[in-house]
Amino acid sequence: MSAASSAHPASITSCPDGPLIVRGELALFDDQGEAVMPNRRTFALCRCGASAIRPFCDGSHKLVGFRTTPPPRTAAVTFDEPAPSTLNAE
C-alpha cells in the first residue's frame, strides 16, 4: 500500500435504490483485467445494469425503477406447531 492510498483509504456506500458511492483511492478493473480509471476521487458504480457508461452510474436506475430491498428476515430455527384440533383431543 502506498503512502497516498493509506492517506485516503477507500470507502464504499450503498445508496438505497441507487449506485455504490466510492470515495478515496481504489484500483478498479474491467472483466478483461484492464484498469478502469475514474476521472475523480469520488464516483458512483452502477448496480442496476442500465447505465450507458458502465461500470459508472449515469442515473438510469431512476428511469428503470431499480429498487433495492433488504432480504426478508427469517428465524434461524422454526418449529412446526401442532394443529389446534390435536391440542385438546382428549
Image (tube, helix red, strand yellow):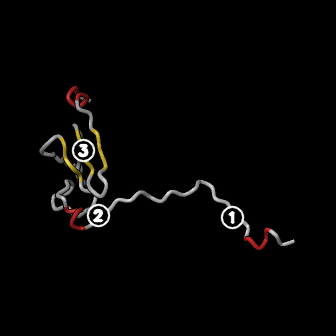
In x, y percent, where is residue 49? 25, 62
The quarter of the displayed image where residue 9 is located: top left
Where residue 17 sits: x, y (%)?
30, 58
Residue 80 circle label: 1
- Measuring from the top left, give residue 47's x and y in whole percent: 28, 57
Please tell me which residue lies in front, 39 or 60. Answer: 60
Q: Is residue 72 left or right of residue 8?
A: right
For mark 3, give the secondary structure: strand
Q: Residue at x 48, y 59 (%)?
A: 72
Q: Residues within 10 Å of mark 2 (few under 14, many from 20)?
A: some
Furthest toward the right, the residue is 90
Marks 2 and 1, the one that precedes in the sequence = 2
Q: Residue at x 58, y 56 (%)?
A: 75
Q: Amino acid at mark 2?
A: Phe
Label 1 sits on what residue type?
Asp
The residue where tag 3 is placed is 22
The residue positioned 27% from the left and 50% from the top of the image is: 20
